[in-house]
Image: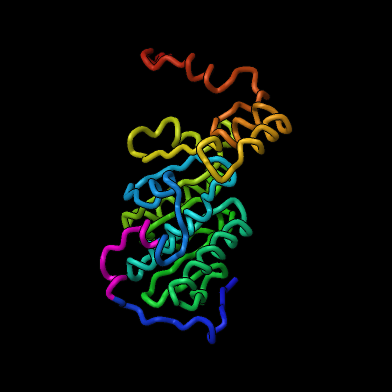
Amino acid sequence: MYYTFDDNKIREKRAGRPEARGVIDAVEFARKRLRFEPDARQIEVLRSDAKRGILNCTRQWGKSTIAAAKAVHRAYTRAKSLVLVASPTDRQSAELLRKAAEMVALLGIRPRGDGDNETSLLLPNGSRIVGLPGMEGTTRGFSAVSLLLIDDAARVDDAMYKALRPMLAVGQGDLWLMSTPRGKTGFFYECWEHEGADWFRVSVPATECARIPAAFLEEERRAIGPLWFAQEYMGEFVDSGAALFGRDEVERAVDDSFEPLNV
């Protein structure tokens, strides 16, 4: 989908304005230009210059809004940059692009598509934000990506994740994963638990989000049970219970000190 707004209400500004050429603090950009007041944990994410970032957060924390803000900040401040947004479904990618389009409009820029991709935004400075469909086979073909955002990453297939990563090679782009957990499987879990110091990690349980009332959380704990509550609201990676042995038990049983048998 292409995003269009009333030309009589929003006038497109010229590219190359002085503030876009300089360094613009992402938090001040969000506050003053996007009219969005981030909380303390959201400030961490916006200000981070990590090449690899992973956000494990409660439902309804605002991860899609933060992803949209990071995408718009990158596209606006770095001319001709390419920002890719991946999600489990087309609808989710389109929803995040809709938020980004609303932010672009606040900058005085008329949002429009790039002419090639159905879910996309083209800025006057030549930067693009492109929402990808949720299928690995239709995401190839992009290169020199400046920023790759994977929203709801725990529900994105491993095959798609592996197809997206090479797009960062030429442009030495940044990669951010944002999600609520979904069991102890998949690349989101592996990156959070096992990828080491390469990743900047941010964990936000619902008890640290002032926008979610404590009374609502207690109601949810009773309604959906402790395991679902731990996953959806507390950022815990919970075994499904279907396997005979849990993931933690299997990992504790593995001993890397043994030499392989030559038979």
Q: Is residue 22 left or right of residue 30?
A: left
Extreme residue toward the bottom, this view: 8
Say if 151 sits above or below 146 in the image. above
Q: Residue at x 64, y 27 (%)?
A: 227
Q: Is residue 23 magenta?
A: yes
Q: Where is residue 216 in the image (x, y as percent from the top left)?
A: 66, 38
Q: Is residue 15 magenta?
A: no
Extreme residue toward the right, this view: 223
One can see residue 156 in this view:
no
Q: Position of residue 47 (x, y in %)?
A: 35, 51
Q: Where is residue 260 in the image (x, y as percent from the top left)?
A: 39, 16
Q: Residue at x 37, y 45 (%)?
A: 52
Give whichever of 168, 59 is nearer the camera.
59
The chief SS type of the magenta part is: helix
Give whichever of 33, 135 is nearer the camera.
33
Q: In this view, does 170 lie to the left or right of 140?
A: left
Q: Where is residue 103 in the image (x, y as percent from the top left)?
A: 49, 67
Coloring applied to the structure: rainbow
Q: Is residue 224 left or right of residue 47?
A: right
Say if 64 sits above or below 202 in the image. below
Q: Which residues lie in the magenta part?
A: 18-29
**Which quadrant is the C terminus positioned in?**
top left
Q: Which residue is drawn at 53% across and 83% down?
A: 9
